[in-house]
Amino acid sequence: MLFPGALMPLHVFEPRYRQMTRDALDTHRILVVSQILPGAGEGPPGHPAIANVAGVGAIVEAQELPDGRFNILLEGRARVHLTELPFVPPYRRARGELLEDKPGEISDIDQHSLIAVANAFTAFVQARDPSFNFTLPPSLPSPRIADLCAHHLILDAKERQTILETLDPVARVRLVSESLALQLAMLKRENRNTLN
């Protein structure tokens, strides 16, 4: 999943996705990243069902390798509601309708809670894996901080999808805070059990 404001490096190696990348680079430089829904069946043969809400991103860096593969960097720009179009080989296409956040004012308490639990979770992970690095840009609004935390810190794909679909910024900030607090509590419990 790709959240607004997040960066996602991708190595593109399948022939159909090489063509898709080439087509995007030659036109609008936009790609959508959608979650494949487990157990939801398939559409056309070989095309698993996808989530209707996805992240849209712009290719901000691209390197074509000598054998036709690509290394690209996507920057998340927005949430979109997808309507899949009829399949035209070699890759799937969809029409995307931009989704806007609903109006909502984040309280200072909610903002501080989000930042505190994100920093605590990051510190816990870094203490066990010094190579892990996640820093919150201080000037971002709370909904964007929640998006970055969801992209980089939330472990469960179903939870990330729920967060991506949450257009109420107050609810999204609280949901990310609660999810991170639960993850941190579980990791601490597992750590204690391992030490005993």
Image (cartoon, grey):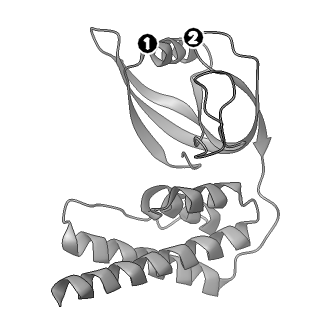
Q: Position of residue 172 (x, y in %)?
A: 67, 68
Decide: marks 2, 1 in contact (CB < 8 A)? yes
The residue lying at 58 percent from left, 62 percent from top is 159
Q: Which disc is residue 15 wearing?
A: 1
The residue lying at 49 percent from left, 63 percent from top is 149
Position of residue 51 relative to residue 48, above or below, is below
Q: Position of residue 57 (x, y in %)?
A: 57, 36
Q: How many marks?
A: 2
The residue lying at 40 percent from left, 80 percent from top is 186
Q: Position of residue 9 (x, y in %)?
A: 39, 37
Badge 1: few (under 14), some or many (20 or more) residues near its Cα, within 10 Å?
Answer: few
Q: Quadrant of residue 112?
A: bottom right
Q: Quadrant of residue 125?
A: bottom left
Q: Using the rendered image of the protein, determine whether residue 68 is visible from the camera's viewpoint.
A: yes
The residue at which mark 2 appears reads as: 90
Position of residue 112 relative to residue 158, above or below, is below
Q: Which disc is residue 174 wearing?
A: none
Looking at this view, name the residue that lies furthest to the bottom.
196
Q: Answer with left or right where residue 188 lies relative to residue 60.
A: left
Q: Using the rendered image of the protein, determine whether residue 140 is visible from the camera's viewpoint.
A: no
Disc 2 marks a residue whose amino acid type is: Pro
Disc 1 marks a residue whose amino acid type is: Pro
Q: Earlier in the sequence, mark 2 or mark 1?
A: 1
Badge 2: few (under 14), some or many (20 or more) residues near its Cα, within 10 Å?
Answer: few
Q: Position of residue 27 (x, y in %)?
A: 61, 13
Task: Give the alpha-carbon distance from disc 2 to disc 1, as whole Å.
Answer: 8 Å
- Per the image, label 1 sits on a secondary structure element best described as helix
Looking at this view, name the residue that lies furthest to the right.
103
